[in-house]
C-alpha cells in the first residue's frame, strides 16, 4: 500500500479560477508574498504566480520537467535549475540616484541580479507576449499554486514521510521538522509548485493559508483578488460554487489531467474571440485560441465546457436567466468565499498566517 493510499482526507478544499476574468494584475501573487515569502530564504519564491499563456511559465517550461503519474506509475521528474525559477533581483538605485554624474542619472532604472549582471529570466517573464500571428494573436492568464492533489506525487516521492494531507481540508503540507532537503518532492510534482529553501535546507510550498482557513478567513490570494476571479469551498458542499462549477455544470476543469494527480484546483477555460479572415472580418467558424492547445491544458472535456459557457452566455444575452452565469459573475463578493467569508479585521487583532 502506497503512502497516498494511507492518507484519507475527510474533506477536500478546492479552488476554481476563471480565466475569463483574470486581468493579470498579480495582486494575488503579491498578497501571498507579503504574507508568506518575503524573508528567511524565501525571497525568490512565488507560492502563487499568474502566468501569461501561452507562455513558458514558472519555472521556465514548467510542464516539461516530468513528475506525476502515467498508467498508475510515478513518472520520473527533474528539478529545474535555480535560474529557471527566476532569482530575486534588485535595481540600480545606487547608480541612478546616488551617482554624481548627470550621465548616470539619465540612465533608466535597470534590474540587476545578485552578481550585478542583467537578469535573463523571472516569474511570468514572458508577460503578455501571447501566441498566434497578427491579427489573430491571443493570450490569457493562468494562476499557478499548489493544487492540493488527491494523488499528490510529492507525497508519494518523499522517503521520510514529511509530506501529508490534512484530514480536515485535504491541504498538502510539508513537515519541516521531518524534511531532510532531498528535493524528491519537487522533482515529482509535475506542476513544479514546491520550492527549496537553501537557508533552512527544507522544501517549502503554498500552504493554502490554512491558519486563515481555521478562523473562517479565505486564503489571501482569493480574498485580495479585485476581479472576483477565484472561488473557494469544500468539494462536498453540493450547494456551493465549487461543486456546481465542477460537477453540475462541468465547466471548471483540472490543469493537465494527463499528469493523473487529481488536482483540486480547477479552471474555467478561456472563451476565445472569433478569428479574423483575410479581409479583416470576423470568421465565426474559427477561434483565435487553438482548441488543440486548450485540450492539452485542460483535457478533452474543454470542448463541452466551452459549448456550455457559450450557450449560457447567449441565454442571458437573450434576456433569460442562468444559474451558471450568476455564479461566475458573483455579484455578491462574499459568495466566492464559501464558508470562509469571515472579515479578518473583525477577529480582535488576531494575527493570521504568521509562521515565519
Image: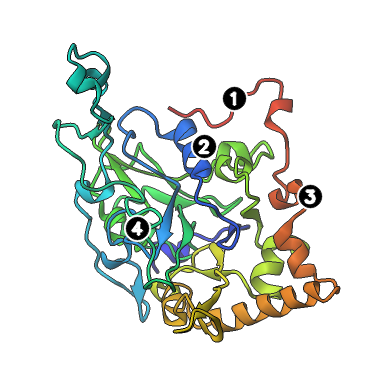
Answer few, some or many: residues within 10 Å of disc 1's Cα (few below 14, many 20 plus, some between 14 and 19): few
Above or below — where is 317 with respect to 329? Answer: below
Query: Label 3 crowding class (10 Å Cα cut-off): few <14, some 14-19, many 20+?
Result: few
Gap in angstroms between the C-alphas marked 3 and 2? 22 Å
Separation of residues labelled 2 and 1 (CA atoms): 15 Å
The scheme the figure's colours follow is rainbow
Quadrant for the N terminus in the image: bottom left
Name the residue located 20 percent from the left edge and 14 percent from the top edge. Answer: 99
Circle 1 — which element?
Answer: loop
The x, y position of residue 229, in whole percent, is 61, 54
Q: Nearer the viewer, mark 2 or mark 1?
A: 2
Residue to which mark 4 is pinned:
57
- Which is nearer the eye, 13 or 165? 13
State the separation of the CA atoms marked 4 and 3.
Answer: 32 Å
Sequence-wise, the earlier of marks 4 and 3 is 4
Task: Give the SS element for disc 2.
Answer: helix
- Residue at image mark 3: 332
Please name the residue that numbered disc 1 is placed on.
Answer: 351
Amino acid at each position: 500500500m502506497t503512502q497516498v493510499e494511507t492518507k484519507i482526507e475527510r474533506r477536500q478544499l478546492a479552488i476554481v479560477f476563471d480565466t475569463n476574468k483574470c486581468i493579470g494584475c498579480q495582486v494575488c501573487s503579491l498578497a501571498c508574498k507579503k504574507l508568506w515569502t518575503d524573508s528567511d530564504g524565501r525571497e525568490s519564491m512565488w507560492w502563487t504566480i499568474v502566468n501569461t499563456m501561452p507562455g513558458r511559465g514558472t519555472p521556465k517550461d514548467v510542464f516539461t520537467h516530468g513528475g506525476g503519474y502515467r498508467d498508475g506509475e510515478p513518472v520520473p521528474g527533474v528539478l529545474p535549475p535555480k535560474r529557471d525559477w527566476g532569482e530575486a533581483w534588485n535595481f540600480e538605485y545606487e547608480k541612478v540616484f546616488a551617482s554624481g554624474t548627470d550621465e548616470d542619472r539619465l540612465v533608466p532604472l535597470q534590474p540587476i541580479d545578485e552578481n550585478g549582471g542583467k537578469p535573463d529570466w523571472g516569474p511570468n517573464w514572458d508577460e503578455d507576449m501571447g501566441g498566434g500571428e497578427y491579427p489573430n494573436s491571443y493570450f490569457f492568464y493562468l494562476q499557478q499554486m499548489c493544487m492540493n492533489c488527491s494523488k499528490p506525487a510529492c507525497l508519494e516521492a518523499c522517503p521520510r514521510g514529511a509530506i501529508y494531507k490534512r484530514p480536515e481540508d485535504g491541504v498538502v503540507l510539508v513537515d519541516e521538522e521531518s524534511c531532510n532537503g532531498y528535493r524528491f518532492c519537487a522533482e515529482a510534482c509535475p506542476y513544479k509548485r514546491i520550492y527549496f529553501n537553501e537557508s533552512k535546507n527544507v522544501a517549502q510550498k503554498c500552504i493554502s493559508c490554512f491558519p486563515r482557513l481555521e478562523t473562517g478567513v479565505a486564503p489571501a490570494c482569493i480574498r485580495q483578488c479585485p476581479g472576483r476571479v477565484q472561488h473557494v469551498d469544500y468539494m462536498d458542499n453540493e450547494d456551493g460554487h465549487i461543486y456546481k462549477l465542477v460537477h453540475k455544470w462541468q465547466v471548471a476543469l483540472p490543469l493537465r489531467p494527463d499528469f493523473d494527480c487529481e488536482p483540486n484546483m480547477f479552471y474555467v477555460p478561456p472563451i476565445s474571440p472569433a478569428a479574423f479572415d483575410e479581409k479583416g472580418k470576423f470568421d465565426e467558424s474559427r477561434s483565435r485560441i487553438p482548441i488543440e492547445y486548450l485540450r492539452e491544458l485542460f483535457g478533452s472535456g474543454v470542448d463541452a465546457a466551452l459549448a456550455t459557457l457559450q450557450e449560457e452566455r447567449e441565454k442571458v444575452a437573450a434576456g433569460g436567466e442562468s444559474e451558471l452565469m450568476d455564479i461566475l459573475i458573483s455579484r455578491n463578493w462574499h459568495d466566492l468565499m464559501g464558508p470562509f467569508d469571515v472579515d479578518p479585521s473583525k477577529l480582535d487583532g488576531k494575527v493570521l498566517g504568521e509562521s515565519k
